[in-house]
Amino acid sequence: VQNVGILAMELYFPSQYVDQVDLEKFDEVGTGKYTIGLGQSKMGFCSDREDINSICMTALHRLIEKNNINLHDIGRLEVGTETIIDKSKSVKTFLMTLFAKEGATDIEGIDSTNACYGGTAALFNSINWVESSSWDGRKAIVVAGDIAVYGKGPARPTGGAGAVAMLIGPDAPLVFDCGVRASYMTHAYDFYKPDLASEFPYVDGKLSIKCYLSALDNCYNLFCKKMRKDNPDFKGLLSLDGMLFHSPYCKLVQKSLGRVCFNDFLNASSADREKQFPGLSQFNNHKREETYFDRDVEKAFMIYSEKLFNEKTKPSLHVAKNVGNMYTPSLYGGLVSYLVSKSPDQLIGKKFALFSYGSGLASTMYSISICKDMSAGSKLERLINSLNNTIAMLDKRQCVEPQVFSDLMDVRTKNYHTAPYEPSGSIDVLFPGTYYLVRIDEQRRRTYERK
Ligand code: ACO
């Protein structure tokens, strides 16, 4: 099989959001802290009407409908999520209700979990399956979804929610490059969820930033090394048309692109440094490990990389800025944003890198090439048209006051383990086609309807 990758894609984000300007006032923090300091504009959230099963099902069902997918043509279904409700029971098994109805039950794959990385793990499993001897000619679907909520405090404005569904198979318009995935995995307590009685994580904000940036250093350098095996002229960022990142908040992504340039600077010969990085020689002896919170390095390389950021990364941040950190779908919301920012002509033949990070920690940098052949071209056009319709829904959302948002969060928190339970969140506010929770019974079994 050739050109294995993403054939079709669908993104779901909640129909309600809170404005970060309003939230700054409500939280009584300095004006500009969330909007300029974190680079965020709006934060999507779910009431108690939605949970991880429902949002994943909403994305999956939309993908199937919009692309007329025959359920018997799917041989693998995988989920990436860190939003846990039934512990031993996967979200995938709930999604099977859609398939089992049609008698389609011969479907491999199950959930993958490690913070924001699970979606990427699920995606790699599906790509690998299509490329393997186990493949039976059918396609795979990957669903990544999360409801990202934090307790009151500085992390709360970095929440979000959403789900992405992706159809995987051969002859795709978005092809995964072979042999260049570069991973960095190690142990860290930067963000984890040890309190099973709560929906909120334990998070060491500063440590999580350091872990994210050091994972980026490691993945980027290894990725470049692997790329150079095939192409000795590969120049990292300069040889790529785009670089996309997992986005906890947009400011961290902008800092990350500066960090990539700092790595290029450190890796350059002294002659190249003079040419490519004029005026930055005061950083000649700086070390990667000692500069994660070095303001001078950060500022100098953010200024240096501004044009590269605007060209190669900023177009990928539209969803992140307007929905927030969706956790596992975050990077794929970046992919959607990047694709809709261009026309198919502008995308043909382009190559871009993606950096996936999940606290704890697991991370990979990999690359996607946009297929040049004509049949893939028409699939690409269909994909972009469909995603344009989805993105237009960002403007159809309802803005709610921070007090209403805070009250809805309190309802979620208070009832996180209540059973039996009937949710009180509005059904009217949901987009048509959204799945919602009707009831949790005494045995904590959940029932859903579709609007
Ligand atoms: N106007 C403009 N900018 C401001 C203002 C203001 N009035 N006030 C503060 N800022 C800036 C700060 O200078 C800082 O930016 P800088 O670092 O570029 O200087 C930024 O706003 C954030 O403010 P801080 O005081 O540094 O941070 P805070 O303690 O509020 O927490 C944090 C921020 C750590 C990101 C927190 O929101 C958090 O813990 N989030 C969850 C963890 C996270 O997302 N980690 C990232 C990787 S792991 C993952 O994906 C979950």
Image: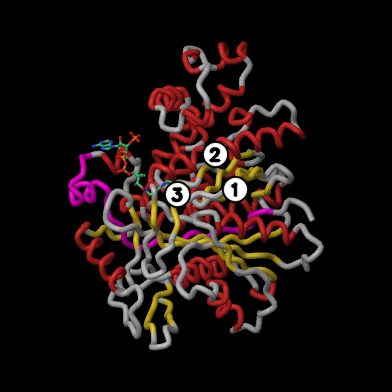
Q: Which residue occupies 62% across, 61% down?
A: 167
Q: Quadrant of residue 445?
A: bottom left
Q: Does residue 22 belong to the magenta stretch?
A: yes
Q: Is residue 337 visible?
A: yes
Residue type highlighted by circle 3: Asp
Q: CA distance from mark 2 to mark 3?
A: 15 Å
Mark 2 against mark 1, which lies toward the viewer?
Answer: 1
Q: Quadrant of the C terminus?
A: bottom left
In primary-sequence order, the first of circles 3 and 1 is: 1
Q: Nearer the viewer, residue 353 or 215?
A: 215
* Residue annotated with mark 2: 216
Q: Residue at coordinates 30% horizontally, 68% vertically from top-left?
A: 413
**Image quadrant assignment for residue 220:** top right
Foreground of the two, 380 or 11: 11
Three-letter amino acid code at the position of disc 1: Met
Q: Position of residue 450 (x, y in %)?
A: 43, 77
Q: Is residue 345 above or below residue 144?
A: above
Q: Which residues are magenta?
A: 5-31
User: Does the beta carbon at disc 3 come under 8 Å from ligand 1?
Assistant: yes
